[in-house]
Amino acid sequence: MRRTASRAAAPARTGAGGRVAAVDTLRGFALLGILIVNITYMASTHQGSGAADPAFDGPVDHAVRAVVAALFEAKFFLLFSFLFGYSFTLQLGSAHRAGTRFRPRFLRRLAGLFALGALHAVLLFPGDILTTYSVLGLVLLAVHRIRLRTALRLAAALLAATAAAYALLAAALWRAGGGGVDTAAAEAGAARAAEALRGDAASVVAAHLEQLPDVAFLLVFFQAPAALAMFLLGLVAGRLRLLDDPGRHERALRRLLLAGGTLGVAGGLVYAHAGATRPGSAYHVLALGVDVLTAPLLAGAWGAAVVLALRSRRLGRLTGALAPPGRTALTNYLAQSLVGALLFTGYGAGLVNRVPPAGLAAIAVALFTAQALACRWWLRHHRYGPVEWALRAWTVLGRPPWRAAPESGGSRAPRSAADKLSTKR
């Protein structure tokens, strides 16, 4: 009986501007996962260096790091990338209905994202993804008329080629002696970076600039191919309107949750174990290749779990609370980095390398909760987030509405995505 009622739920496309509630909710969820990962890099110069932090070496510290690495790292930016591709189709359809030229607007949007991302990387957090998205967006624009089957094959080829490249590199390292990390050098580098990050503003910016080449290498050879593959999968899903009424695909979502979760968690455990026990080794590089193939499955399982939860009377309101931060994701993403900079660098408290992993996870959850509440209040009175409004003004070369229209919020809080999906339950 419950299943029948669930399938009768209203389509997800509701609300101001014909927004897709499931997309906003998934974007908010992805933003939470990205924060849980990013805060570990904002708060510790040991993260990613190959050297363990000697200040936090207890069982709880290792357990939290393992959970974040296995279940969160390299997963949520993929879900966010999928949604970028899906949202591209929504923007394209909106421009077509309005009779406006899409290409010039989208190019201005990408230019705006690149500028924001460059400032973000230099001033707040070198691990920026906006610049990568803006460059890959040009590729998406160039191929957006691609046949669906070709897009799926190209996405699979990108992931397979990247994984194969890691396997070949792992084999080369193994033949050369196994690779590894110079722990003493890594610890010394982490100490120098921490000292720089606790300095004045000029010192912080200099430290960020010093990190950028390593970050760029990671983006080009690990994140960018996977992100482009997810762009293409999102493009396919958007053209098929798969998230407009998720209830029609409940069986497929359950299969994705089971299969993707099983294989994705297995790959994540290999990735986490290799990074914790043999950083920089042939085993670690091979594990990166395994993660390239399995992380999209786990990202898909996470997404399926959220969409299925939206259709549940018990969990729907909880997951529906993710929609407001998802509608203002750009503002929240940059605000998260600003708070991180104020907490962990010389801009503010200078707490880099001084907060344990469990404390970082708690800070991330608390910060996101505060953002969700603030966004719910903001969207009662405003149509866009502050940064979204500025980016849209640049994109359309005009002044978008600042206040919310009465039907999209007015003085009342917008209905949650769960309410929208369970209207006919």
Image (tube, rainbow, N blue to C red):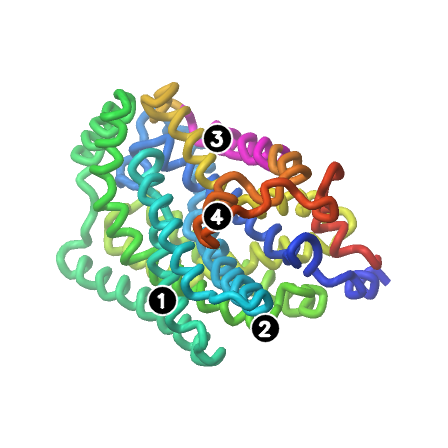
Q: Is residue 103 above or below residue 355?
A: below
Chief SS of the magenta region:
helix
Q: Which residue is drawn at 54% across and 65% down?
A: 95
Mark 4 packing: few (<14 Cα in 10 Å), some, or many (20+)? some
- Which three-letter amino acid code belongs to the residue tagged 3? Ala
Quarter of the figure that contains the N terminus: bottom right
CA distance for labels 4 and 2 = 29 Å
- Between the residue at mark 4 and the residue at mark 3, the CA separation in whole angstroms equals 40 Å
Q: Which of marks 1 and 4 is nearer the N terminus?
A: 1
For mark 1, what is the residue? 139
Residue at (43, 57) in percent of width and height: 267
Q: Does the magenta stretch include residue 75?
A: no
Q: Which residue, given by chain and number where applicable, does mark 2 sit on?
A: 240
Question: What secondary structure is found at the residue carrying circle 3?
Answer: helix
**Residue 363 is covered by the magenta coloring:** yes
Foreground label between 2 and 1 = 1
Which range is magenta? 355-373
